Image (cartoon, grey):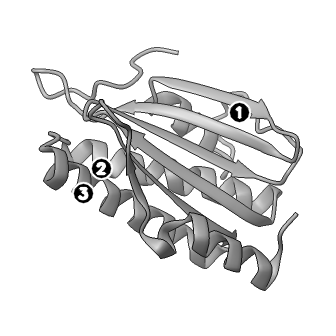
Amino acid sequence: MLTGARFMEQSMMYGRTGQERRETAGTHTIQDSAAYEMTSGEIARARAFVRDFLSRAQSLRGASVSERAVDVAQLVVSELATNVCKYAAGPCLLDLETDGSVLDIAMWDSGSVLPAASAADPTRVGRHGLELVLMVCQSFEIRREPVGKRVRVQLSLHDSPNGNPAGQTTW
């Protein structure tokens, strides 16, 4: 496991610091990655990374991304990053990919505990983040990795013709 300065040195080679942006050959897919030594201050950086990524997708590919989708993508990343801060302190990798209609968000961390949504309880204060993520995303997947876990979600970048969000509507 990489920690501290060594992790940041490695993340500079693979993450946003180097501004490495990949376009998959023969497709209209755009990808980017960022690495964080996840602390609460890094959550804002992760949200900004998502916002900048979607802005680049719009300018480079002419992708039509609704304002709602930008807000929802930032919310999802914020909630996933908050879980890393609370339950898996340490390095975190954020991968984004879009084809212009769907945003794929994958977050890896070194923690072994898998997140689980709590049962609905309107009187509970806090711990609603995963519930929110499940409500707004089209898909949600958790995979154990050789070290840690990877959470992958997808959300629509478009609203329906009547202006409603195109994410999950029922659970």
User: Which percent across, then down, holds residue 122?
Assistant: 61, 37
Which of 20/66 is in front?
20
User: Which percent across, then down, holds residue 6?
Assistant: 78, 79
Whether residue 149 sits left or right of residue 56 in the image: it is right
Q: Earlier in the sequence, mark 2 or mark 1?
A: 2
Q: Identify the secondary structure beneath mark 1.
A: loop
Whether residue 85 sits left or right of residue 44 in the image: it is right
Q: Is residue 142 above or below residue 3?
A: above
The residues bearing labels 3 and 2 have C-alpha atoms spaced at a distance of 12 Å
Give the image quarter of residue 100. top left
Number of other residues with Cα within 10 Å of mark 1, as a class: few under 14, some 14 to 19, many 20 or more: few
Q: Earlier in the sequence, mark 3 or mark 1?
A: 3
Quadrant placement of the N terminus: bottom right
Residue flagged by tag 2: what amino acid is it?
Val
- Residue at (62, 48) in percent of width and height: 107
Residue of label 1 = 117
Residue of label 2 = 70
- Checking the image for residue 141, the label placed there is none
Q: Is residue 39 visible?
A: yes
Q: Earlier in the sequence, mark 3 or mark 2?
A: 3
Q: Identify the secondary structure beneath mark 2.
A: helix
Residue flagged by tag 1: what amino acid is it?
Ala
User: Which percent across, then down, holds residue 79?
Assistant: 57, 52
Residue flagged by tag 3: what amino acid is it?
Arg
- Residue at (58, 42) in percent of width and height: 106
Disc 2 versus disc 1: nearer the observer: 2
Whether residue 77 sits left or right of residue 63 in the image: it is right
